[in-house]
């Protein structure tokens, strides 16, 4: 750790050196010759010390400024995600044979952002379909479907209102220094090769718009059934139900031929099975089944096979970090072939057993009970508590053993930590609370460890002032 000396310590040091070499005692007057020299020299020394400290920090990825971090990143082939201008597809009414020239300016009605046409477009079927590019790059120019833009100046035969039909390119801000520093440090600390976890994170985060990627071996739990009407038949090696629909799942077809399921709750048939066929009331498996009647809770869960891989993706653009299908497809393409079209994963890692999924965003509700505080400060207190909790929950993220740096491990939400964040705000404003607790769905928890691909966020915050 770099520790700078105080200016007063430097002055004392310089004055002592002058007194020693000149064999004099410095008078107490600040205008004494040796005092003046000591102050002047110390000021110069302090400037040099600050410069040396700043240059020392610039050499370390963990302390470098953004511009210096970009240099370190380039040396390690990690380039900061650039700011991107939004491109939108729009349609407007137009008279026969009317044209819309390139560079024509449009103004978004909801945000005031300026857009220009990418090319010259001609009327077809009473409309003009055009692509517009935002003049200012970044997320502020993004528009939703059905939003409207007004033409900057009239154009003969062209309607004055354009309607957004789709987004061709999402506008993105430049990657934050926090996110970029994390990627640079990951590249330095984690060595890829052979399609390991570090490779999968690097390949995923190369895609513009990805804030973070969490790679794991195995598949996500996407198919699970628990019911008491499930029974087993040895005659055709089948798992059967009388009421439960084995196909009534959020992800259709996730349990197909060749998939593995794990059965629990049935002492005779607990174990893993290979699916041969599936219908609403029957799953036929390859392994031997023992006849067992219904009546107890049986759980069936899909199970991973060798080669299964899952990458949870967090988006920069969405407030909750939930990626669009387009971004997920881009991540899959980057993992499988990259920008050069060469197959990346090693032999045997095929696309059909790669699962690219959105992160799971879990909201945590916080209750602050019996808060004593001046009435005039309560509104400020509520705002600052919300901001402190936003920061706390945003910093917690899944920890992947063998990939993430252990000293950075922060995957646990605890009652003391949440309470400290709240009480620190209250203390600064002269107040205190009798209790602070967090919960999910009404269940108060002492602690919570984030699961695979799970990110936290602040839910509702209830503050009871007395």
Image (spheres, helix red, strand yellow):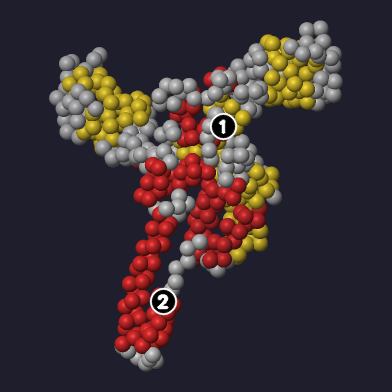
Foreground residue among 233 and 50: 50
Q: Residues within 10 Å of mark 1 (few under 14, many from 20)?
A: some
Q: Residue at x 69, y 44 (%)?
A: 443
Q: Which corner quadrant of the image does residue 280 belong to?
A: top right
Q: Which mark is residue 456?
A: none
Left or right of 107, for residue 388 = right
User: In this view of the protein, which residue sits in the foreground, 143 or 35?
Assistant: 35
Q: Residue at x 36, y 39 (%)?
A: 82
> Residue at 47% of width from left, 66% of height from top?
3
List the single residue furthest toward the left.
156
Q: Position of residue 15 (x, y in %)?
A: 39, 83
The residue that appears at 49% across and 35% down in the rendered structure is: 202
Q: What element carries label 1?
A: loop
Report the residue marked by disc 1. Answer: 196
| Residues tagged 2 and 1 counted as in contact (Cβ below 8 A) | no
Label 2 sits on residue: 10
The picture places residue 152, in percent across and down from the top left corner, at 20, 34
Q: Residue 267: where, in percent of width, then height? A: 85, 24
Which of the 4 image quarters holds residue 14?
bottom left
Expressed as whole percent of the image width and height from the top left, the position of residue 411 reads 61, 45
Q: What element carries label 2?
A: helix
Work out how far the residue at label 2 is from the one at label 1, CA to CA, in angstroms. Answer: 52 Å
């Amino acid at each position: 750790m770099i520790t700078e000396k105080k200016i007063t310590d430097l002055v004392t040091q310089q004055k002592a050196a002058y007194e020693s070499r000149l064999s004099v005692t410095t008078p107490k007057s600040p205008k004494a010759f040796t005092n003046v020299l000591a102050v002047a020299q110390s000021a110069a020394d302090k400037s040099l010390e600050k410069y040396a400290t700043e240059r020392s920090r610039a050499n370390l990825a963990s302390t470098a400024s953004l511009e210096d971090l970009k240099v370190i990143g380039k040396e390690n082939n990690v380039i900061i995600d650039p700011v991107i201008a939004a491109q939108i597809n729009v349609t407007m009414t137009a008279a026969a044979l009317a044209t819309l020239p390139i560079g024509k300016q449009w103004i978004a009605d909801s945000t005031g952002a300026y857009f220009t046409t990418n090319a010259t477009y001609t009327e077809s079927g009473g409309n003009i379909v055009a692509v517009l590019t935002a003049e200012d790059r970044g997320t502020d120019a993004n528009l939703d479907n059905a939003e409207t833009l007004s033409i900057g100046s009239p154009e003969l035969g062209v309607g004055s209102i354009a309607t957004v039909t789709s987004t061709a390119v999402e506008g993105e801000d430049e990657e934050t220094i926090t996110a970029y520093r994390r990627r640079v440090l990951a590249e330095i600390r984690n060595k890829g090769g052979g399609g390991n976890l570090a490779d999968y994170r690097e390949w995923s985060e190369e895609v513009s718009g990805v804030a973070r990627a969490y790679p794991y071996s195995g598949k996500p739990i996407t198919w699970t059934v628990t019911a008491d009407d499930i029974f087993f038949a040895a005659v055709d090696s089948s798992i059967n139900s009388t009421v439960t629909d084995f196909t009534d799942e959020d992800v259709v077809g996730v349990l197909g031929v060749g998939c593995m399921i794990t059965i629990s709750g049935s002492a005779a048939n607990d174990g893993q099975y290979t699916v041969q066929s599936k219908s609403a009331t029957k799953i036929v498996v390859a392994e031997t089944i023992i006849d067992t009647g219904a009546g107890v809770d049986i759980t069936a869960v899909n199970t991973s096979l060798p080669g299964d891989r899952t990458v949870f993706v967090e988006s920069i653009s969405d407030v909750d970090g939930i990626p669009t299908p387009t971004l997920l497809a881009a991540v899959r393409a980057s993992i499988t072939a990259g920008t050069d079209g060469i197959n990346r994963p090693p032999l045997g890692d095929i696309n059909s057993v790669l699962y690219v999924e959105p992160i799971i965003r879990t909201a945590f509700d916080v209750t602050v009970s019996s808060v004593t505080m001046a009435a005039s400060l309560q509104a400020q207190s509520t705002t600052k508590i919300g901001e402190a909790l936003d920061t706390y929950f945003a910093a917690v993220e899944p920890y992947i053993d063998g990939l993430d740096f252990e000293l950075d491990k922060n995957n646990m939400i605890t009652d003391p930590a949440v309470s400290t964040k709240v009480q620190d705000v209250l203390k600064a404003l002269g107040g205190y609370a009798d209790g602070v607790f967090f919960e999910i769905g009404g269940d108060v928890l002492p602690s919570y460890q984030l699961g695979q691909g799970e990110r936290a966020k602040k839910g509702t915050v209830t503050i009871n002032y007395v």
